[in-house]
Amino acid sequence: MIQTDQQFDDAAAICRDIFTKKMKDYGASWRILRPQSVTDQIFIKANRIRSIETKGISKVDEGIRSELIGIINYGVIGLIQLELGCSETDDLAYDRGVELYNKYLNQAKELMMNKNHDYDEAWRTMRMESYTDLILMKIYRTKQIEDNQGKTLISEGIDANYFDMINYAMFGLIKMEEDNS
């Protein structure tokens, strides 16, 4: 588990680096996104991964790795938006944005480590395609919850689904980083 702990941190550092650089370039322009739009952004990225996996080729010079990073970062953005609500303007200072990003990525890691303990790192034996399918399933669940105005009878809420999307994408990113080392 120590290896997983460090691998999560290493992958998180890659995602954080991209998030912070984009915050410098664009500010928090994503603050105008309504929750459904964040979910759709994640869907676009997961659907593209599935398309690449199915077709075996990508015609755009960004592969699965960049889409996994995007899912992680949009998942965190979704959690921030759930906390703050969407805005009509770019109203989030850089330092506060990074602070919230770190808060939610740390919560995702804590959840992953707890589940990892209970499931004995079963994710390591899963195929990459399964992560994609599970992320897509979580997206469809989230869309249904959004269509129900956030109300559920027995199920976890939108935030739990965002955390799961982040962690499945993190598993994929960790596996890709392992394969490249």
Image (spheres, rainbow, N blue to C red):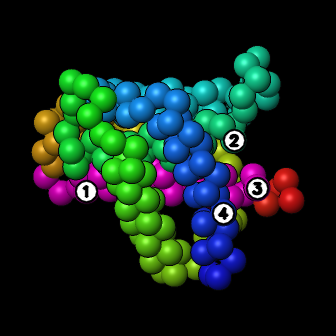
Can you tell which quarter of the image residue 58 is in? top right
Q: Secondary structure at mark 4?
A: helix
| Neighbourhood count class around disc 3 (C-alpha, 10 Å): few under 14, some 14–19, many 20 upward | some
Name the mark on residue 65: 2
Image quadrant containing the C terminus: bottom right
User: In the rendered image, which residue does mark 1 sit on?
Assistant: 156
Residue 133 visible in rendering: no
For marks 1 and 3, the one nearer the N-term is 1
| Neighbourhood count class around disc 4 (C-alpha, 10 Å): few under 14, some 14–19, many 20 upward | some
* 166 is higher (above) or lower (below) than 3: above
Q: Secondary structure at mark 1?
A: loop
In three-dimensional space, the C-alpha distance between marks 2 and 1, rounded to whole angstroms, equals: 28 Å
- Determine the main secondary structure of the stretch shown in magenta: helix
* 158 is higher (above) or lower (below) than 4: above
Q: Do the CB atoms of the residues marked 4 and 1 lie less than 8 Å apart? A: no
Q: Residue at x 16, y 49 (%)?
A: 152
Q: Do the CB atoms of the residues marked 3 and 4 lie less than 8 Å apart? A: yes
> Is 168 contained in the magenta span?
yes
Q: Residue at x 39, y 50 (%)?
A: 95
What kind of residue is marked 1?
Glu
* 14 is higher (above) or lower (below) than 111: above
For marks 2 and 1, the one nearer the N-term is 2
- Residue 101 appears at what percent x and percent y? 41, 53
Q: Which residues are magenta?
A: 153-177
Name the mark on residue 177: 3
For marks 2 and 3, the one nearer the N-term is 2
Q: Nearer the viewer, residue 43 or 61?
A: 61
What kind of residue is marked 2?
Arg
